[in-house]
Image (spheres, rainbow, N blue to C red):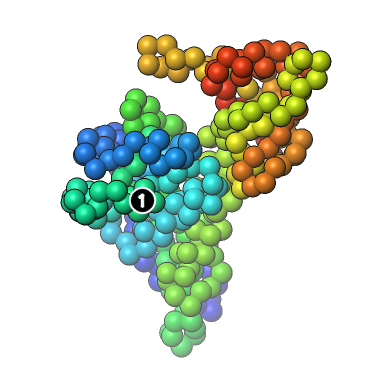
């Protein structure tokens, strides 16, 4: 690293916890949701997928592990695609559950009870490395800090316990910063785009079909979906349209066809052109009151 400075490494060697951690996170969430203080997501009037973020695990103590979890929460929230609930401090959450059982809390706005909404998926992570380097001057005085961070992340379904394959993220050494915390934060900021891309490609945007926007010759020509600029939708994006049938309490999707975004309407809606060969079926399903959703087709960058 050069002769002008001595690098003193403060290393939290955080080895992978193993398969027990994902199951443990989902089980804790499952047990938490048995509490009577939990409210149904429909009461929140928000049809986005509810995602909880568990505190990222690290075998050895480090004062900077929370910066990793906080960055993941930030990226999730900024995507505007998920209803994010904080599960990083279970002691505080349990105390809040008890507080919300009190009579004076009944009737409070759902926005004040965000952590009481049941998570459908849990983000779980293992920090494998947090390294902080003290950068020294020739006289031995500290002039700044650099850092390196590595972690793995998975998403687990609370109900089924199904879990995605672990994906690794690593931030290289940063520029010199005035503090160790700033160096770790800079390292996490450098990984923000990679984390956002992980959520974009692993969990494609899903949008509800709201109405038939236009018809031609008695068939659907365009539809309006509940996803727009705030969700990262762009003109030219393609979506796969599916109708949803309920069988024995389970959703059974049937693919209909594809549509293409032609216009962004406000922040949360888009108009999509329907291929003529799918127009009649989409119109029939919509008029019959069938649920229809559009899933973003991921184009590789």
Q: Counting other residues with Cα less than 10 Å from the Cα at mark 1, is it few (<14), some (14-19), or many (20 or more)?
A: few
For mark 1, what is the residue? 109
| x then y, percent, for residue 110 | 36, 48
Drawn side of residue 123 relative to residue 194, left or right: left
Name the residue located 26 percent from the left edge and 37 percent from the top edge: 33
Q: Quadrant of the C terminus?
A: top right
Please give the count of numbered marks on the rendered protein: 1
Above or below for 71 versus 184: above
- Callout 1: SS: loop
Q: Which residue is located at x 53 percent, y 34 percent? A: 203
Near-viewer residue (212 or 258):
212
Q: What residue lies at 68% left-to-right and 37% top-to-bottom?
A: 270
The residue at 42%/69% (across/down) is 181
Observer-nearest of 278 and 110: 110
Image location of residue 123, percent across then percent down: 40, 42
The answer to whether residue 279 is visible is yes
In this rendering, position of residue 106 left or right of residue 73:
left
Q: Position of residue 241 (x, y in %)?
A: 63, 22
């Amino acid at each position: 690293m050069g002769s002008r400075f001595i690098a003193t490494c403060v290393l939290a060697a955080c080895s992978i916890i193993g398969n027990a951690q994902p199951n443990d996170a989902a089980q804790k969430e499952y047990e938490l949701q048995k509490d009577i203080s939990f409210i149904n997501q429909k009461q929140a009037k928000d049809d986005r997928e509810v995602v909880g973020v568990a505190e990222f695990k690290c075998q050895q103590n480090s004062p900077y592990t929370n910066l990793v979890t906080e960055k993941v929460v930030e990226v999730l929230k900024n995507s505007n695609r998920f209803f994010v609930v904080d599960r990083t401090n279970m002691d505080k959450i349990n105390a809040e559950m008890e507080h919300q059982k009190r009579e004076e809390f009944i009737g409070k706005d759902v926005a004040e009870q965000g952590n009481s909404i049941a998570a459908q998926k849990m983000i779980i992570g293992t920090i494998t490395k947090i390294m902080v380097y003290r950068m020294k001057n020739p006289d031995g005085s500290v002039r700044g800090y650099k850092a390196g961070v590595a972690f793995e992340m998975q998403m687990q379904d609370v109900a089924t316990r199904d879990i995605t394959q672990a994906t690794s993220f690593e931030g290289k050494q940063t520029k010199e910063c005035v503090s160790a915390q700033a160096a770790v934060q800079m390292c996490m900021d450098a990984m923000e785009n990679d984390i956002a891309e992980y959520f974009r490609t692993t969990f494609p945007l899903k949008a509800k079909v709201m109405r038939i926007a236009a018809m031609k010759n008695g068939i659907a020509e365009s539809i309006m979906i509940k996803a727009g600029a705030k969700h990262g939708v762009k003109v030219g994006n393609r979506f796969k349209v599916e109708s949803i049938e309920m069988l024995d309490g389970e959703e059974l999707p049937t693919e209909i066809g594809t549509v293409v975004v032609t216009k962004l309407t406000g922040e949360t809606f888009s108009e999509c052109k329907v291929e003529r060969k799918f127009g009649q079926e989409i119109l029939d399903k919509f008029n019959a009151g069938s649920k229809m959703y559009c899933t973003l087709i991921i184009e590789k960058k």
